[in-house]
Amino acid sequence: MAVSPSSTKSLTLDQVHARNQELEQALARALAARDEAEQQLNEQRWFHETILNALPVEVAVFDTERRYLYVNEQAVPDSEARSWIIGRTVEEFCQQYGYPLELAEYRQQMFGQAMESGQVVEWDDITPGTEKPRIHHRAFNYVASTEGKPALMLGYGLDITERLAAEREMKKAKEVAEAAARARENFLANMSHEIRTPLNGVLGYANLLAKSSLQPQQKEFVQVIRSSGQHLLGVLNDVLDMAKITSGKMEFEQVAFNLCDSMGQAVQPLALQATQKGLGFYGQPLRMTCPVPWVIGDPHRLNQILINLTANAVKFTDKGSVSVGGFLKSETDTHLTVEFRVTDTGIGIPANKLAHIFEDFNQAYADTTRRFGGTGLGLSISRALVEQLGGTLTVESEEGRGSTFAFSLTLPRATPSKVVEAVSAPESTSNSLRAKRVLLVEDNEINRDVARLFLEGWDMVVDEAVNGLVALTMFEEQHYDIILMDIQMPGMNGMETTAIIRQHADKRKAAVPVLALTANAFQADNERYLAAGMNDCLAKPFDESALEAKLTALLAAAPPKPYDLSQLRASAQGREAFVVKIIRSFLTNIPDSLQGLKEAAAASQWPRIAEIVHHIKPNLAALGITAAEPMVARLEECRHLLGASPAEASEVHATVVELVTLVEQVLEALPEELPQE
């Protein structure tokens, strides 16, 4: 049976047309979505690249094969070069731009470290440049990974060429400034020495002359010499103090003292000056508001502040009065906050000068120096001292009506018992100096004469040496109770001479007290002298009482024994025979042990060293040789030392020498504890 066309399923033209429209609309929507996605992607790419290109660092992304996936403009400014570099390796980049192969290998090595560690790796390299002579990079690399996606290496770096150049310039400038500061300090130190040395002779002879029989006019002349010399010394000290302050080398002691008593004694001479000038002088002691004004600090520097302010008040006041007061502002269990005020009725300070009076070498009036004298450093020094002590210095003044200077400080408390213990010292008396033999080592004839006259005035026996070599010869031939040692001498200086004295074979002679006589005024110098083996220092110019006090204190201080038998005697419970037995055993047996210890050290027999030290350890402890404990502990560790490096061997040998020297000192001094036979 035939099928008629009318029965066949077919689309009409209208239906086909409608279907085509639907397909066209779907295609248009798909194309629009694609365009929108591309636009969003481009916007994101533009956003990220804008940020990355704006960064002041070089940014690059690599795949695991170290091929470039991205670089920003900071890393490669040229757009064509940036396009070329994508997909290239680091080696290809270096070859293209003529960089050495070593640079590529080094960068690959850093990439490998980042890959292996998973941590940020920091590294530096220097890239030879074409336009720039050399580019110093500081680079950072780390791995960024996401699950299901290949790992990426992110690198970023900085061109630190200019920064390094700036740092070099800063370092050079710092070195120049430090050299200038050292030169200034050396100049001031040398000038101080050159001024103090003859000034010591001037003031020394003036003091000696004042003790002789003089006519009234001669006494007046001597007093002028002494006051002029003291004024010159004050000016010199002011200049040195400013040098210390500006170089940051101002030294501050930390001792316990009575703040009220100390500062009251400091201004007492100025009260006398005010009275002699016809001024009223009024004071309010700190103890009126603070019954227990014990503190820890630097009494010399605190007194210096108050003396400067009070001296200015007396100097610039022709009529009226000067008043000085101490006041407690607040207190805690650990600290006191105090204020000191100095008020005068003097010439005052103009309002337009108040802001400048604390500047160096600045005075309120142009003719101040001519009328009143001074350097203009007192107030600037006082302000600097107060500020370095953590306080403030203020001024209120009215021209023609006077001034008030005040400073406040917060200081740690100290109990009176601690103060007494801290400041107690042997009483200075010439009786303890009588018949003592002293070696005076001084190359300056005038200063030698001054010191000799002082010493002979206390009935001391004086031998004189003009330099270090002569002093060593005399020291070898004669026993001395004390040595006065100048520092700067031709040929061999005082420190070198003292070092040789301290190495003398006779330990008792080597321990003779040495007092440094120095024209240097810096604390660092005194520390060097003490480190060289000197016992104390006395700055020139010195007066008679200061020298007497130093000598008395040094002669009264017996050298400490290198052992302590108190524990041994306590264990003996009064049986002195037991103590003697232990001492004799020590004197008999220890020398052999020391010899074995030295031989073991010479042969580098480390376990043997530990064995000997462990064997004598109880004997050292029994005699209270506590200084040996750290040496013994170090040498006992040698039991674990099979092979020693040169540094370790050197340390062991040095410790052995140190221990042997200490025990030999004990062996030399210990017979004094045995009964006389």
Image (cartoon, grey):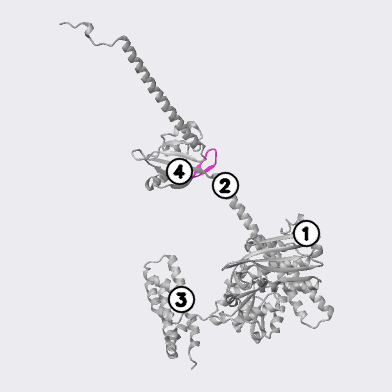
Instruction: Calculate the distance from the C-alpha at mark 1 to the C-alpha at mark 3.
Output: 67 Å
User: Badge 1 is on which residue?
Assistant: 398
CB under 8 Å between callouts 1 and 4? no
Residue 653 pos. (x, y %): 45, 71
Which class describes the residues within 10 Å of circle 4: few (<14), some (14-19), or many (20+)? some
- The residue drawn where x is 46% and y is 79% is 625
**Which amino acid is tagged 2?**
Ala
* Residue 587 in view of the camera: no
Assess whether residue 129 is covered by the magenta stretch.
yes
CB under 8 Å between callouts 1 and 2? no
**Which amino acid is tagged 4?**
Leu
User: Badge 4 is on which residue?
Assistant: 103
The quarter holding residue 428 reads bottom right
Relative vertical location of residue 99 with respect to residue 20 in this rendering, above or below: below
The quarter holding residue 211 reads bottom right
* Mark earlier in primary sequence (1, 3): 1
Range shown magenta = 125-141
Closer to the eye: label 1 or 3: 1
Closer to the eye: label 1 or 4: 1
Task: Tell me, for residue 175, which label it has, or none.
Answer: none
Task: Tell me, for residue 165, which label it has, or none.
Answer: 2
Instruction: Calculate the distance from the C-alpha at mark 1 to the C-alpha at mark 4.
Output: 74 Å
Placement of the N terminus among the 4 image quadrants: top left
Instruction: Calculate the distance from the C-alpha at mark 3 to the C-alpha at mark 2.
Output: 52 Å
**Which amino acid is tagged 1?**
Glu
